[in-house]
Image (tube, rainbow, N blue to C red):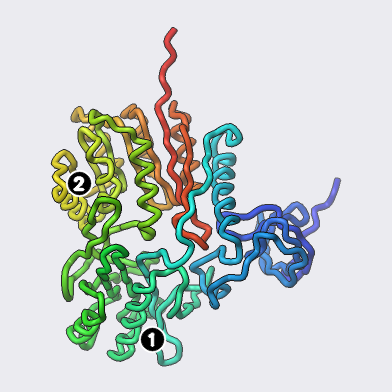
């Protein structure tokens, strides 16, 4: 019997990267143990140092790279190694697209009985590689006596100040930098999670890429500004800004927004255009961060739905009804739901704006509304779901199954929860028609995908 050799922290070894993990890290094996090495690409050989030991895996850092992958490129961002926002700037864009398709394949292989070699899993559709994000959501902290804004370094509480970013829209970044300077000018107290005190927590800036309209939200622990009137006026005077809001988040949470929002200056909603539609966006409403790519994805949803005018459609996790708008003209009726009340107001306004009187949106969870509608006799034909990273609630999956809907179009930002939920549906006689991945966030390890599932037809004997 072979004795398993235990790895030690500080130990140095030579490894070859076999594959990549869900966070963009390289994966090797040592002594039959998985080792995660950030920054290592498939096929590369390197000298590494073990930094952490866990029950089922170890973490390591690169000391020296011996063999270089043809996919390796020089990161464009000067603080790429410090900032936790991107994970794949050291990989060619072609390599990133292959990696994201492989992530989906691996997730379905691990969590389902789908034959990924025979299944219709399509190539990842790429997009603009840089300056694509229409929204910045930066934490606020202190560097000495200076207020700064930025992102936390990966797996740490260390805030990395960001005044330049290669994936953010330039206008969004310009406004964020100006707001950060104003926080310094007004000497606004910075929130401390350890002390549960201070005022400013986050700066959120959203830019309408097609309209140029800019929205600024100050997220505060409490309304303790010495001169909020003056601060909001000066933010409103920043060129392009047409909406300034204050959101209060007094909870010890990683969530950015709290429940209370007040418009301080300008309009409540900014406008953005996507496809043939104009969207009204309130401060807390979810909207795709890469509208250019979202247009392609929504076009595929319309194609996959193949509506004839006779279908009842559910738009679950609806946000501002962005997907619902695209399918409404082909549906007999659209019903959607969202837990954020302001987003439901936005979705309702969008439908009225375009004369879709057969579309209705409500506040609440899909898993609560679907059984109620079915009981009342309103049985869906098509479900379109676009859940958060955690995936669909099990109650919603069961509600979709119970409704016997003919088709489910699942839009996902997390291959692991997507595969898990699809496995649940596949066990209830739904088959995967095809999977189409999209690169919504270049330079990161995230991948978006559309999975089209159809109810199996019962065999006639």
Q: Which residue is mark 1?
A: 147
* Residue 75: % across, % down: 58, 70
Give above or below for 429 relative to 103.
Answer: above
Give above or below for 347 relative to 150.
Answer: above
Give above or below for 400 relative to 143.
Answer: above
Q: Is residue 256 shown to the viewer in this render?
A: yes
Q: Alpha-carbon distance for marks 2 and 1?
A: 41 Å
Label 2: which secondary element: strand
The C terminus lies in which quarter of the figure? top left
Disc 1: CA contacts within 10 A as few (<14), some (14-19) or many (>=20)? many
Q: Which residue is mark 2?
A: 362
Name the residue furthest right. Answer: 1
Q: Nearer the viewer, residue 39 or 158?
A: 39
The N terminus lies in which quarter of the figure? top right
Q: Nearer the viewer, residue 187 or 287?
A: 287
User: Residue at position x 72%, y 60% from top?
Assistant: 44
User: Residue at position x 29%, y 73% from top?
Assistant: 219
Q: Is residue 36 shown to the viewer in this render?
A: no
* Residue 416: % across, % down: 51, 47
Lower position in the chain sequence, tag 2 or tag 1: 1
Instruction: Tally the marks.
Output: 2
- Give the image quarter of residue 345: bottom left
């Amino acid at each position: 019997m072979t004795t398993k050799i235990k790895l030690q922290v500080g130990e140095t070894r030579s490894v070859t990267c076999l594959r990549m993990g869900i966070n963009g890290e390289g994966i090797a094996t040592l002594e039959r143990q998985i080792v995660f090495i950030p920054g290592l690409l498939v096929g590369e050989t390197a000298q590494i140092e073990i930094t952490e030991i866990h029950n089922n895996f170890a973490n390591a850092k690169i000391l020296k790279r011996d063999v270089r992958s043809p996919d390796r490129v020089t990161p464009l961002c000067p603080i790429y190694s410090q900032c936790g926002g991107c994970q794949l700037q050291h990989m060619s864009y072609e390599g990133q697209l292959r990696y994201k398709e492989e992530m989906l394949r691996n997730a379905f292989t691990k969590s389902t009985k789908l034959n990924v070699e025979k299944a219709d899993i399509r190539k990842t559709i790429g997009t603009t590689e840089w300056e694509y994000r229409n929204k910045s959501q930066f934490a606020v902290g202190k560097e000495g006596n200076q207020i700064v804004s930025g992102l936390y370094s990966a797996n740490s509480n260390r805030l990395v100040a960001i005044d330049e970013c290669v994936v953010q829209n330039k206008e969004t970044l310009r406004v964020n930098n100006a707001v950060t300077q104003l926080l310094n000018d007004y000497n606004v107290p910075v929130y401390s999670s350890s002390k549960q005190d201070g005022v400013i927590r986050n700066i959120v800036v959203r830019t309408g890429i097609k309209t140029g309209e800019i929205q600024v939200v100050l997220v505060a622990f409490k309304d303790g500004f010495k001169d909020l009137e003056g601060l909001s006026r000066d933010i409103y005077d920043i060129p392009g800004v047409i909406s300034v809001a204050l959101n209060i988040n007094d909870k010890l949470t990683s969530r950015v927004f709290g429940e209370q929002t007040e418009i301080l200056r300008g309009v409540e909603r900014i406008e953005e255009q996507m496809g043939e539609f104009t969207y009204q966006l309130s401060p807390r409403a979810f909207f795709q961060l890469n509208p250019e790519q979202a247009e392609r994805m929504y076009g595929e949803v319309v194609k996959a739905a193949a509506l004839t005018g006779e279908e009842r459609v559910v738009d679950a996790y609806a946000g501002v009804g962005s997907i619902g708008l695209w399918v409404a003209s082909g549906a007999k009726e659209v019903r959607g739901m969202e837990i954020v009340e302001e987003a439901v107001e936005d979705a309702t306004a969008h439908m009225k704006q375009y004369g879709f009187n057969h579309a209705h949106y409500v506040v609440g969870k899909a898993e609560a509304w679907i059984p109620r509608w079915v009981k009342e006799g309103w049985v869906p034909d098509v479900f379109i779901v676009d859940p958060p990273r955690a995936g669909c609630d099990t109650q919603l999956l069961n509600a979709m199954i119970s409704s016997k809907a003919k088709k489910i179009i699942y839009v996902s930002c997390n291959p692991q929860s997507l595969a898990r939920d699809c496995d649940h549906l596949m066990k209830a006689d739904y088959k995967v028609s095809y999977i189409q991945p999209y690169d919504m966030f270049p330079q990161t390890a995230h991948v978006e995908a559309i999975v089209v599932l159809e109810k199996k037809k019962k065999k006639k004997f």
